[in-house]
Amino acid sequence: MKTLNSPWRKTAAAIYGAPKDSKLYGSVEIDITDVELFIAQKRKKGLKITLTHVLASAVGKIIGKDIPELNCYVKRGKIVQRNSVDASISVLMKSGEMGSVIVKGVDKMSLQEVSNYINQKVADVKQGEETKATSNKHLLAKIPWPFRRWVFTLLKFIAVDQAISIKGLGLSPSGFGSFILSNIGTLGLDLGFGALMPGSSVAMAMFIGSAKKKPVVIKDEVVIRKMLTVSVTLDHRIVDGKHGGMLFRGLNRRLNSLAEL
Protein backbone atom coordinates (compact mmCIF):
# COMPACT_ATOMS: atom_id res chain seq x y z
CA MET A 1 0.00 0.00 0.00
CA LYS A 2 1.36 3.40 -0.95
CA THR A 3 2.07 5.83 1.86
CA LEU A 4 -0.38 8.69 2.21
CA ASN A 5 2.47 11.02 3.11
CA SER A 6 4.42 10.98 -0.15
CA PRO A 7 7.00 13.73 -0.72
CA TRP A 8 4.45 15.70 -2.73
CA ARG A 9 1.68 15.33 -0.10
CA LYS A 10 4.06 16.51 2.61
CA THR A 11 5.16 19.40 0.43
CA ALA A 12 1.55 20.31 -0.42
CA ALA A 13 0.69 20.47 3.27
CA ALA A 14 3.48 23.01 3.69
CA ILE A 15 2.76 25.30 0.76
CA TYR A 16 -1.05 25.37 0.57
CA GLY A 17 -3.12 27.31 3.05
CA ALA A 18 -6.90 27.59 3.40
CA PRO A 19 -8.64 28.85 0.22
CA LYS A 20 -8.75 32.62 0.50
CA ASP A 21 -7.00 34.13 -2.50
CA SER A 22 -8.93 35.79 -5.30
CA LYS A 23 -9.11 33.53 -8.35
CA LEU A 24 -11.20 33.37 -11.50
CA TYR A 25 -12.50 30.11 -12.94
CA GLY A 26 -13.97 29.39 -16.35
CA SER A 27 -14.64 26.54 -18.74
CA VAL A 28 -15.79 26.02 -22.31
CA GLU A 29 -16.65 23.13 -24.61
CA ILE A 30 -14.70 23.08 -27.85
CA ASP A 31 -15.49 21.08 -30.98
CA ILE A 32 -12.30 19.13 -31.72
CA THR A 33 -13.67 16.80 -34.41
CA ASP A 34 -11.46 18.38 -37.08
CA VAL A 35 -8.55 18.67 -34.66
CA GLU A 36 -8.57 14.91 -34.07
CA LEU A 37 -8.66 14.29 -37.84
CA PHE A 38 -5.68 16.66 -38.20
CA ILE A 39 -3.77 14.80 -35.47
CA ALA A 40 -4.58 11.41 -37.04
CA GLN A 41 -3.28 12.59 -40.43
CA LYS A 42 -0.05 13.84 -38.86
CA ARG A 43 0.45 10.58 -36.95
CA LYS A 44 0.02 8.57 -40.17
CA LYS A 45 3.00 10.52 -41.47
CA GLY A 46 5.01 9.49 -38.41
CA LEU A 47 4.64 12.78 -36.50
CA LYS A 48 3.94 12.07 -32.82
CA ILE A 49 1.50 14.91 -32.18
CA THR A 50 -1.09 14.86 -29.39
CA LEU A 51 -3.92 17.12 -28.28
CA THR A 52 -1.68 18.45 -25.50
CA HIS A 53 0.91 19.53 -28.08
CA VAL A 54 -1.75 21.29 -30.16
CA LEU A 55 -3.14 23.19 -27.19
CA ALA A 56 0.33 24.12 -25.89
CA SER A 57 1.22 25.57 -29.29
CA ALA A 58 -2.12 27.36 -29.68
CA VAL A 59 -2.16 28.87 -26.18
CA GLY A 60 1.47 29.96 -26.50
CA LYS A 61 0.71 31.87 -29.69
CA ILE A 62 -2.46 33.38 -28.24
CA ILE A 63 -0.56 34.72 -25.23
CA GLY A 64 2.41 35.86 -27.30
CA LYS A 65 0.36 37.72 -29.91
CA ASP A 66 -3.03 38.54 -28.41
CA ILE A 67 -3.05 38.53 -24.60
CA PRO A 68 0.31 39.67 -23.18
CA GLU A 69 -1.37 40.22 -19.79
CA LEU A 70 -1.35 36.44 -19.32
CA ASN A 71 2.44 36.52 -19.54
CA CYS A 72 2.92 38.61 -16.40
CA TYR A 73 3.64 38.07 -12.71
CA VAL A 74 3.42 40.07 -9.50
CA LYS A 75 6.67 41.57 -8.18
CA ARG A 76 6.55 43.57 -4.94
CA GLY A 77 2.95 44.51 -5.56
CA LYS A 78 3.47 45.44 -9.22
CA ILE A 79 2.63 43.57 -12.43
CA VAL A 80 5.75 42.68 -14.45
CA GLN A 81 5.93 41.43 -18.06
CA ARG A 82 8.00 38.31 -18.76
CA ASN A 83 10.61 38.32 -21.51
CA SER A 84 9.37 35.13 -23.18
CA VAL A 85 6.30 32.90 -23.28
CA ASP A 86 7.15 29.59 -21.61
CA ALA A 87 4.76 26.65 -21.15
CA SER A 88 4.86 24.30 -18.17
CA ILE A 89 3.45 20.92 -19.28
CA SER A 90 2.41 18.55 -16.50
CA VAL A 91 3.77 15.01 -16.81
CA LEU A 92 2.75 11.88 -14.90
CA MET A 93 5.94 10.12 -13.82
CA LYS A 94 6.52 6.41 -13.09
CA SER A 95 6.33 7.09 -9.35
CA GLY A 96 2.75 8.35 -9.79
CA GLU A 97 3.78 11.90 -8.91
CA MET A 98 3.36 14.84 -11.25
CA GLY A 99 6.39 16.45 -12.82
CA SER A 100 6.63 19.16 -15.44
CA VAL A 101 8.38 20.01 -18.69
CA ILE A 102 9.18 23.66 -19.43
CA VAL A 103 8.96 24.71 -23.09
CA LYS A 104 10.70 28.07 -23.44
CA GLY A 105 9.63 30.42 -26.20
CA VAL A 106 6.68 28.18 -27.08
CA ASP A 107 5.01 31.01 -29.02
CA LYS A 108 7.97 31.13 -31.43
CA MET A 109 7.99 27.39 -32.14
CA SER A 110 6.09 25.45 -34.79
CA LEU A 111 3.69 22.71 -33.72
CA GLN A 112 6.19 20.08 -34.83
CA GLU A 113 8.99 21.72 -32.83
CA VAL A 114 6.74 21.84 -29.75
CA SER A 115 5.85 18.18 -30.21
CA ASN A 116 9.44 17.01 -30.68
CA TYR A 117 10.68 18.95 -27.67
CA ILE A 118 7.93 17.80 -25.31
CA ASN A 119 8.19 14.17 -26.44
CA GLN A 120 11.92 14.11 -25.74
CA LYS A 121 11.61 15.79 -22.35
CA VAL A 122 8.71 13.54 -21.31
CA ALA A 123 10.79 10.50 -22.25
CA ASP A 124 13.63 11.80 -20.07
CA VAL A 125 11.28 12.37 -17.12
CA LYS A 126 9.65 8.94 -17.43
CA GLN A 127 13.06 7.29 -17.62
CA GLY A 128 13.87 8.76 -14.23
CA GLU A 129 15.56 12.05 -15.06
CA GLU A 130 14.45 14.17 -12.12
CA THR A 131 13.32 17.71 -12.80
CA LYS A 132 14.46 20.56 -10.58
CA ALA A 133 10.91 21.03 -9.28
CA THR A 134 10.66 17.36 -8.28
CA SER A 135 14.08 17.49 -6.63
CA ASN A 136 13.03 20.54 -4.62
CA LYS A 137 9.80 18.84 -3.51
CA HIS A 138 11.73 15.86 -2.20
CA LEU A 139 14.22 18.15 -0.46
CA LEU A 140 11.45 20.16 1.21
CA ALA A 141 9.65 16.98 2.26
CA LYS A 142 12.69 15.92 4.31
CA ILE A 143 12.43 18.99 6.55
CA PRO A 144 10.49 18.28 9.79
CA TRP A 145 7.13 19.90 10.38
CA PRO A 146 6.51 22.83 11.14
CA PHE A 147 9.91 23.99 9.85
CA ARG A 148 8.92 22.73 6.39
CA ARG A 149 6.26 25.41 6.02
CA TRP A 150 8.54 28.11 7.41
CA VAL A 151 11.27 27.23 4.90
CA PHE A 152 8.81 27.30 2.00
CA THR A 153 7.39 30.65 3.15
CA LEU A 154 10.89 32.10 3.27
CA LEU A 155 11.83 30.74 -0.18
CA LYS A 156 8.54 31.99 -1.64
CA PHE A 157 9.12 35.44 -0.15
CA ILE A 158 12.57 35.64 -1.75
CA ALA A 159 11.91 34.03 -5.15
CA VAL A 160 8.29 35.07 -5.76
CA ASP A 161 7.33 38.09 -3.67
CA GLN A 162 10.71 39.80 -4.06
CA ALA A 163 11.47 38.25 -7.48
CA ILE A 164 15.04 37.34 -6.48
CA SER A 165 16.31 34.20 -8.22
CA ILE A 166 17.83 31.41 -6.13
CA LYS A 167 19.92 29.71 -8.81
CA GLY A 168 21.10 26.82 -6.64
CA LEU A 169 17.49 25.65 -6.23
CA GLY A 170 16.34 26.74 -9.66
CA LEU A 171 13.80 29.13 -8.14
CA SER A 172 12.78 32.30 -9.96
CA PRO A 173 9.59 34.19 -10.90
CA SER A 174 9.62 32.32 -14.23
CA GLY A 175 10.69 28.93 -12.91
CA PHE A 176 7.30 27.41 -13.76
CA GLY A 177 6.94 29.22 -17.07
CA SER A 178 4.19 31.61 -18.11
CA PHE A 179 1.30 29.16 -17.84
CA ILE A 180 0.61 25.60 -16.73
CA LEU A 181 -1.09 23.07 -19.02
CA SER A 182 -2.33 19.77 -17.59
CA ASN A 183 -4.25 17.02 -19.38
CA ILE A 184 -6.55 15.77 -16.63
CA GLY A 185 -8.66 13.91 -19.18
CA THR A 186 -6.02 11.17 -19.20
CA LEU A 187 -6.80 10.70 -15.49
CA GLY A 188 -10.50 10.13 -16.23
CA LEU A 189 -11.72 13.62 -15.36
CA ASP A 190 -14.24 15.39 -17.58
CA LEU A 191 -13.72 18.78 -15.91
CA GLY A 192 -11.49 20.19 -13.20
CA PHE A 193 -10.36 23.51 -11.78
CA GLY A 194 -6.84 23.20 -10.40
CA ALA A 195 -4.90 25.44 -8.08
CA LEU A 196 -2.45 28.16 -9.03
CA MET A 197 0.40 26.61 -7.11
CA PRO A 198 1.96 29.02 -4.62
CA GLY A 199 5.46 29.78 -5.72
CA SER A 200 4.76 29.35 -9.43
CA SER A 201 3.98 33.02 -10.24
CA VAL A 202 1.86 31.95 -13.21
CA ALA A 203 -1.21 33.98 -14.14
CA MET A 204 -3.03 30.99 -15.62
CA ALA A 205 -3.36 27.22 -15.33
CA MET A 206 -5.31 25.39 -18.06
CA PHE A 207 -6.79 21.92 -17.67
CA ILE A 208 -7.75 19.64 -20.56
CA GLY A 209 -10.69 17.41 -19.71
CA SER A 210 -11.84 14.27 -21.48
CA ALA A 211 -13.17 14.44 -25.05
CA LYS A 212 -16.51 12.78 -25.80
CA LYS A 213 -18.91 12.46 -28.71
CA LYS A 214 -22.01 14.55 -28.13
CA PRO A 215 -25.05 15.70 -30.12
CA VAL A 216 -24.70 19.37 -31.05
CA VAL A 217 -26.72 21.75 -33.20
CA ILE A 218 -24.98 23.06 -36.34
CA LYS A 219 -27.02 25.09 -38.84
CA ASP A 220 -30.24 23.93 -37.16
CA GLU A 221 -29.31 20.27 -37.54
CA VAL A 222 -28.35 17.86 -34.76
CA VAL A 223 -25.02 16.17 -35.51
CA ILE A 224 -22.54 14.11 -33.53
CA ARG A 225 -19.26 15.90 -32.83
CA LYS A 226 -16.25 15.27 -30.61
CA MET A 227 -16.41 17.85 -27.82
CA LEU A 228 -13.61 18.74 -25.38
CA THR A 229 -14.01 20.56 -22.07
CA VAL A 230 -11.23 23.02 -21.29
CA SER A 231 -11.07 24.90 -17.98
CA VAL A 232 -8.81 27.61 -16.59
CA THR A 233 -7.86 29.09 -13.26
CA LEU A 234 -6.74 32.71 -13.49
CA ASP A 235 -4.93 34.98 -11.04
CA HIS A 236 -7.38 37.84 -10.49
CA ARG A 237 -4.51 40.06 -9.32
CA ILE A 238 -3.20 40.06 -12.89
CA VAL A 239 -6.13 39.48 -15.23
CA ASP A 240 -9.91 39.88 -15.36
CA GLY A 241 -12.79 37.85 -16.74
CA LYS A 242 -12.45 39.48 -20.15
CA HIS A 243 -9.03 37.90 -20.57
CA GLY A 244 -10.55 34.48 -20.01
CA GLY A 245 -13.11 35.25 -22.71
CA MET A 246 -10.35 36.41 -25.05
CA LEU A 247 -8.42 33.22 -24.35
CA PHE A 248 -11.32 30.90 -25.16
CA ARG A 249 -12.27 32.83 -28.29
CA GLY A 250 -8.65 32.79 -29.41
CA LEU A 251 -8.45 29.06 -28.77
CA ASN A 252 -11.48 28.39 -30.95
CA ARG A 253 -9.98 30.56 -33.67
CA ARG A 254 -6.57 28.90 -33.54
CA LEU A 255 -8.05 25.38 -33.57
CA ASN A 256 -9.91 26.31 -36.74
CA SER A 257 -6.62 27.41 -38.35
CA LEU A 258 -4.36 24.47 -37.50
CA ALA A 259 -2.08 25.09 -40.49
CA GLU A 260 -0.89 28.26 -38.74
CA LEU A 261 0.37 26.45 -35.63
Image: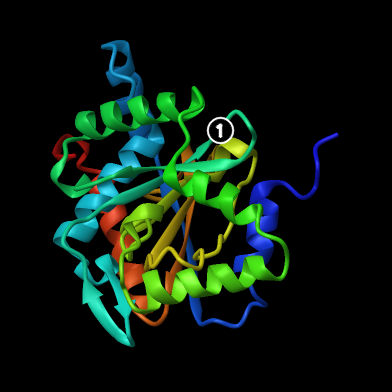
Quarter-of-image position of residue 206: bottom left
Q: Secondary structure at mark 1?
A: loop
Residue ranking furthest to the bottom: 77
Is residue 208 among what the camera can see?
no
Horizontal side of residue 70 vs 199, given as left or right = left
In the displayed structure, 213 sits above or below 47; it is: below
Location of the N terminus by quadrant is top right
The front one of 198 and 162 is 162
Location of the C terminus by quadrant is top left
Tell how many labels. 1
At x 42%, y 80%, the residue is 236
The front one of 135 and 113 is 135
At x 64%, y 60%, the residue is 12
Q: Position of residue 237 (x, y in %)?
A: 39, 82
Q: Position of residue 45 (x, y in %)?
A: 26, 11
The front one of 162 and 80 is 162
Quarter-of-image position of residue 112: top left
Q: Position of residue 40 (x, y in %)?
A: 35, 20
At x 57%, y 50%, the residue is 139
The amino acid on which the numbered mark 1 sits, given as a three-letter code, is Met
Residue ID for mark 1: 93
In the displayed structure, 145 sits above or below 89; it is: below
Q: Position of residue 33 (x, y in %)?
A: 40, 34
Is residue 9 among what the camera can see?
yes
Quarter-of-image position of residue 131: top left
